[in-house]
């Protein structure tokens, strides 16, 4: 009898291992493993770090890039909208900067081609300068010229708005946050709990991975928000946002947004472009309804939320002003 019991336990273990291997292969094909940045920080990255945290380098002298992306919020903003250097609020919720530089386009409308373009545009955006020339003059006043020369030694005019953008992008490219999910993809069966593995299976079978795929589980595509019904009926948004239609004026772009990545999503509430939903389980329920036309039960939602929690990585140790550690 004991031999039969042992044999049965061993058989169950082998079966579970095979199931894990199959799930791992499927997930690796859909998503891919995120790895930590191990390269030495470049001079451009060091400059970008200084600039990212320097509130003096703004029109009001009080607003830094980090002001809308604090470490305690995993590089996003727990506020629905973020105040800028002009005293106004951003028109959309600030997404996380972690893992963001490998996205083909940035911001909710995918209207910035890369991290350098986004950072350069922020000079006359959230940082409040009247012009890029005014921003460059402020950087010169703050004695940044020697640092720009060191970072861009072959550039005849190293202190420029374009190089500001390149430096910020170089720094943000170091902000990778591998998580438990990546340990699982790397071969560690214990990287995910049984509930999280169940949630991963539900995430795939429900159709979530149709849009939230790639190494960041999103961030690379565009999609209408509200495929099966108007999204604001579920989110309670006070005013519908036209999405990319606002910039392209093409009717097919109405209510179309960049698909947000789900890395660290359990730490980056509130959710959606307008920060209209506070809880992750609510966001999952709404997405299933308005995008997939499905009504998930509480158990399935809890399992998916459990899986999404496995995408939370550590706040990078260099996500703080030079010489400091992150404040969480």
Image (cartoon, helix red, strand yellow):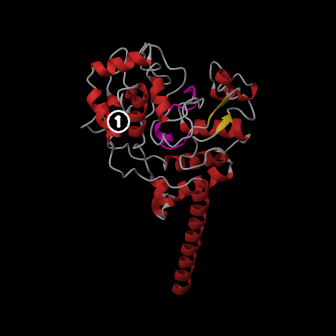
Q: Quadrant of the N terminus?
A: bottom right
Q: Quadrant of the C terminus?
A: top left
* Dominant secondary structure (helix, strand or loop) of the stretch shown in magenta: loop
Residue at 45% from the left image edge and 33% from the top image edge: 76
Q: Nearer the viewer, residue 220 or 145?
A: 145
* Residue 241, horizontal then vertical, whole percent: 64, 22
- Is residue 317 something one can see in this rendering? yes
- On screen, residue 130 above or below 29: above
* Residue 273, horizontal then vertical, whole percent: 58, 28
Q: How would you rate the neighbour count of disc 1 (Cα within 10 Å): few for under 14, some for 14-19, many for 20 or more?
A: some
Q: Nearer the viewer, residue 177 or 127?
A: 127
- Is residue 78 something one can see in this rendering? no
Reply yes or no: does residue 264 show up in magenta. Answer: yes
Residue at 51% from the left image edge and 85% from the top image edge: 2
Reply yes or no: does residue 90 show up in magenta. Answer: no
* Residue 8, horizontal then vertical, whole percent: 57, 79
Which residue is outermost to the left? 323
Provide the residue span drawn in magenta.
261-276
Q: Secondary structure at mark 1?
A: loop
Q: Which residue is mark 1?
A: 152
Q: Nearer the viewer, residue 133 or 210?
A: 133
Residue at 35% from the left image edge and 39% from the top image edge: 45
Number of marks: 1
Q: Quadrant of residue 139?
A: top left
* Residue 204, horizontal then vertical, whole percent: 64, 52
- On screen, residue 2 above or below 294: below
- On screen, residue 175 above or below 181: above
């Amino acid at each position: 009898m004991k031999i039969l019991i042992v044999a049965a336990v061993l058989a169950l273990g082998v079966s579970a291992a095979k199931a894990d291997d199959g799930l791992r292969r499927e997930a690796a094909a859909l998503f891919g493993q995120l790895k930590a940045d191990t390269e030495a920080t470049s001079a451009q990255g060091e400059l970008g770090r200084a600039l990212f945290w320097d509130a003096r380098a703004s029109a009001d002298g009080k607003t830094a890039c980090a002001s809308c992306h604090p470490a305690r919020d995993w590089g996003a903003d727990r506020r629905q909208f973020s105040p800028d250097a002009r005293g106004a609020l951003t028109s959309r919720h600030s997404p996380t900067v972690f893992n963001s530089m490998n996205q083909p386009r940035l911001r909710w409308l995918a209207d910035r081609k890369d991290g350098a373009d986004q950072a350069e545009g922020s000079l006359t955006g959230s940082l409040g300068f009247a012009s890029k020339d005014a921003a460059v003059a402020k950087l010169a006043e703050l004695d940044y010229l020697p640092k720009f020369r060191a970072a861009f030694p072959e550039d005849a005019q190293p202190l420029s708005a374009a190089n500001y953008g390149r430096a910020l992008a170089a720094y943000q490219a170091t902000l990778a946050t591998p998580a438990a999910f990546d340990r699982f993809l790397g071969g560690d069966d214990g990287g995910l709990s049984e509930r999280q593995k169940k949630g991963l299976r539900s995430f795939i079978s429900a159709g979530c991975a149709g849009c939230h795929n790639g190494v960041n589980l999103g961030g690379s595509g565009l999609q209408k928000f509200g495929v099966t019904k108007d999204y604001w009926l579920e989110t309670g948004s006070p005013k519908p946002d036209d999405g990319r239609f606002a910039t392209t004026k093409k009717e097919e772009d109405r209510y179309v947004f960049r698909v947000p990545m789900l890395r660290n999503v359990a730490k980056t509430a509130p959710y959606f472009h307008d920060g209209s939903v506070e809880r992750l389980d609510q966001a999952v329920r709404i997405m299933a309804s308005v995008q997939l036309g499905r009504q998930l039960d509480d158990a399935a939602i809890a399992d998916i939320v459990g899986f999404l929690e496995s995408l939370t990585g550590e706040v990078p140790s260099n996500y703080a002003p030079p010489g400091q550690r992150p404040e969480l």
